[in-house]
Image (cartoon, rainbow, N blue to C red):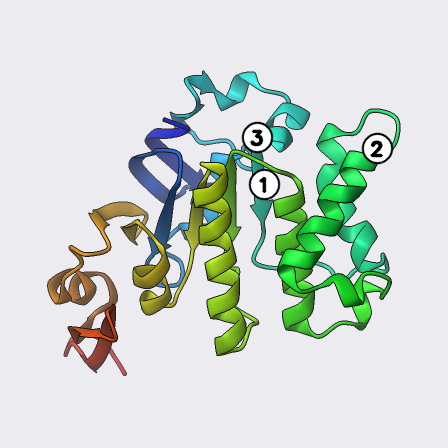
C-alpha cells in the first residue's frame, strides 16, 4: 500500500469541508475524485500532502504518517499539481527542472538533466524547451506543470483538474501519459476531475464526494446512474461505446435548477 487515508476531517474556520474521508491506494492505480463544485476535492488533495493540516485523521505514506515527514521528504514522495498556477518567466526546460529540486543537493547532475529531457520528449514539449513558459498557450503551460511533476519522480501524483485547459485531443493524450506513468513506475495518482467520462476511461476507481463526505468509492465499472443522480442531481444513462463506459446526462432532478 502506498497511500492510506484514514478518517480525514477538515474545516475552514467553523465550516466543515471534509468529514470522515478514507481510502487506500495500491501501486499502479489511479483514483478519480468526483463531485460537484465545492464538494471538497481540492481541499482533500491539499490535506494529502500537508499543504493543509487535517483537524482529524491520518495520511500514511508506506505506513509513515505524513506529519512526521519534512517538506523535502514529502516532495520526494509526492508531486502536487494545483488547479491554478502562475505563468512563469522561466524557460520550459528550467520550469520542468524545478521538479528535480527535492533531489538536488548542490546543483543539477547529468542524470537530472537527462530526466528532464526525457520528460520533455514524452510530453511533446522538447521543441519548446528554450521558450519562456509565459509565451505558451494555456494548454501548453498546463502540460509544463504536469511535466514538472513527472520529473519529480514521486510515488504519489496529486493532480487537481490536470485537463481543464486542454482540448479534447490533449485531454486524451495527457490522461494517457498519466496512466502510462502510473502503471510503468508502479506509483499511484489521485486526480480531481470534473469530466466523468475521462475519469471512467482512465481511472481504476472513483471516489464521489458529496458535501465533504465520501459518498461512494467504486470501481469504474460499478458506477451507476443512481449514484450520479445522488451526487450531481442529474439523471443519466450509462452505455458502452467503442469499448468505453460513457455517461450521457439527461435532465436535472426537479429539486435542482438547470
| Circle 3 Cα neighbour tier, 10 Å, few/some/many (<14 / 14–19 / ≥20) | some
| Relative image position of residue 113 (x, y in whole percent) | 80, 42
Mark 2 or 1: the one toward you: 2
For the point 47% across and 36% down, which residue is it? 48
Front residue of 237 and 52: 237
Image vertical order of residue 232 relative to residue 116, above or below: below
Mark number, residue 79 = 1
Mark number, residue 77 = 3
Asked whether the residues under the numbered discs 2 and 1 touch, taking CB atoms below 8 Å apart as contact, a structural biologist would say no
Front residue of 174 and 5: 174
Disc 2 marks which residue? 109
For the point 14% across and 79% down, which residue is it? 254
* Left or right: 254, with 112 as reference point: left
Front residue of 5 and 170: 170
Task: Assign the N terminus to one quadrant of the image.
Answer: top left
For the point 32% across and 48% down, which residue is it? 212
Q: What whole-number distance in Å separates the C-alpha atoms at marks 2 and 3?
A: 20 Å
Amino acid at each position: 500500500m502506498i497511500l492510506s487515508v484514514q478518517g480525514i476531517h477538515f474545516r475552514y474556520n467553523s465550516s466543515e469541508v471534509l468529514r470522515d474521508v478514507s481510502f487506500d491506494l495500491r501501486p499502479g492505480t489511479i483514483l478519480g475524485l468526483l463531485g460537484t463544485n465545492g464538494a471538497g476535492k481540492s481541499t482533500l488533495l491539499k490535506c494529502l500532502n500537508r499543504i493543509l493540516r487535517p483537524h482529524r485523521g491520518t495520511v500514511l505514506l508506506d505506513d509513515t504518517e505524513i506529519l512526521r515527514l519534512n517538506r523535502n521528504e514529502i516532495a520526494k514522495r509526492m508531486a502536487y499539481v494545483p488547479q491554478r498556477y502562475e505563468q512563469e518567466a522561466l524557460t520550459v526546460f528550467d520550469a520542468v527542472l524545478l521538479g528535480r529540486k527535492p533531489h538536488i543537493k548542490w546543483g543539477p547532475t547529468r542524470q537530472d538533466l537527462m530526466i528532464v529531457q526525457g520528460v520533455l520528449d514524452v510530453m511533446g514539449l522538447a521543441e519548446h524547451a528554450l521558450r519562456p513558459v509565459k509565451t505558451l498557450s494555456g494548454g501548453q503551460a498546463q502540460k509544463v506543470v504536469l511535466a514538472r511533476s513527472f520529473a519529480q519522480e514521486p510515488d504519489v501524483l496529486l493532480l487537481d483538474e490536470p485537463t481543464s485547459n486542454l482540448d479534447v485531443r490533449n485531454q486524451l493524450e495527457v490522461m494517457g501519459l498519466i496512466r502510462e506513468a502510473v502503471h510503468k513506475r508502479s506509483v499511484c495518482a489521485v486526480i480531481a476531475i470534473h469530466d466523468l467520462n475521462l475519469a471512467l476511461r482512465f481511472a481504476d476507481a472513483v471516489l464521489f464526494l458529496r458535501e465533504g463526505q465520501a459518498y461512494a468509492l467504486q470501481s469504474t465499472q460499478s458506477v451507476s446512474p443512481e449514484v450520479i443522480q445522488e451526487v450531481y442531481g442529474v439523471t443519466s444513462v450509462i452505455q458502452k461505446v467503442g469499448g468505453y463506459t460513457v455517461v450521457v446526462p439527461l435532465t436535472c432532478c426537479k429539486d435542482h435548477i438547470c
